[in-house]
Image: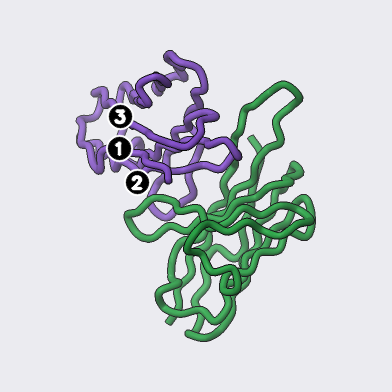
Amino acid sequence: GQNIDQPTEMTATEGAIVQINCTYQTSGFNGLFWYQQHAGEAPTFLSYNVLDGLEEKGRFSSFLSRSKGYSYLLLKELQMKDSASYLCAVSVNDYKLSFGAGTTVTVRA
Amino acid sequence: GAVVSQHPSRVICKSGTSVKIECRSLDFQATTMFWYRQFPKQSLMLMATSNEGSKATYEQGVEKDKFLINHASLTLSTLTVTSAHPEDSSFYICSARVVPAVGDSYNEQFFGPGTRLTVL
C-alpha cells in the first residue's frame, strides 16, 4: 500500500509563513502534487514536483527530495482566504493519485 | 485549465434506491477518469479508475456490483450507487486525467466540483 503522512492541523497568523511537510513511501513515483481544498469543494491544483528542488509559484512554493521521500508546501504572506485543507498526493506508476489525509490550515487575524 | 463538471451537485435519496452521478470533461477528451469518495474531515479515497471503452478497475474493498461505473464516451463517465444505504452518504468526486503530450510524463488530474450524497 501507499503511505503518505502530513500533519493534521496548523495555525498561523495573517501575513506569516507556514510550511506543510509531507513524507511518503509508495510503490512507485511519477510526481508529487499539492492541492488546496476548501470545505465542501473539490481540490484545486497548486503545484507539481517530479524532480528534486524548489518550484515557486507566487506566494506558494513546493519542494521535493525523492531520496528522502519528502516534500513541503510553503505558503507565504498568508491571507484569510488561505484557510483550507492542503492535500499532498503522490502519482504512482499507473498514474493513480494517492492522497495524504490533508492538513487543515487556519489563518488568524 | 481543463474543466470537469459533475451532476448533480447534491442529492438526497431514500435507503434502497439507486443514484447516478455524471462526470463530464467539458473542453477536452479524457480516456481515463477517476472516482473518489471523501468522508467528513478525511482525505480522498480512490474508488475506481474508469477507462473509456473498457471495464473499470476497482480499488481493494470497493464493491463493483454496488458502485457501477460506465465510461461510455471520451467525455462522460457515470457512477451509479445501487441500493444506497446511509453509510454510503459521502462526498463523491470525479477527476479526469489529461493525456500528456508525447515525451511528457506530466500527470495532472482535473477535479469535478463533487456530489454530496445523503441517504436517508
Q: Which residue carries the number 2 mark?
A: A101
Chain ID of residue with mark 2: A
Q: Residue at x 68, y 23 (%)?
A: B104
Q: Position of residue A2 (x, y in %)?
A: 42, 42
Q: Amino acid at mark 2?
A: Ala
Q: Which quadrant, please, contains the C terminus of chain A?
A: top left
Q: Which chain is purple?
A: A
Is residue A85 placed above or below A66 in the rendered structure? below
Mark closest to the chain's N terminus, 3 or 2 = 3
Vertical arrangement, residue B90 with respect to residue B102, above or below:
below
Residue pointed to by mark 1: A6
> What is the three-letter code of the residue carrying label 1?
Gln
Q: Earlier in the sequence, mark 3 or mark 1?
A: 1
Q: Secondary structure at mark 3?
A: strand
Q: Residues within 10 Å of mark 3 (few under 14, many from 20)?
A: some
Q: Residues within 10 Å of mark 2 (few under 14, many from 20)?
A: many
Q: Position of residue A79 (x, y in %)?
A: 31, 31
Which tint is chain B?
Answer: green
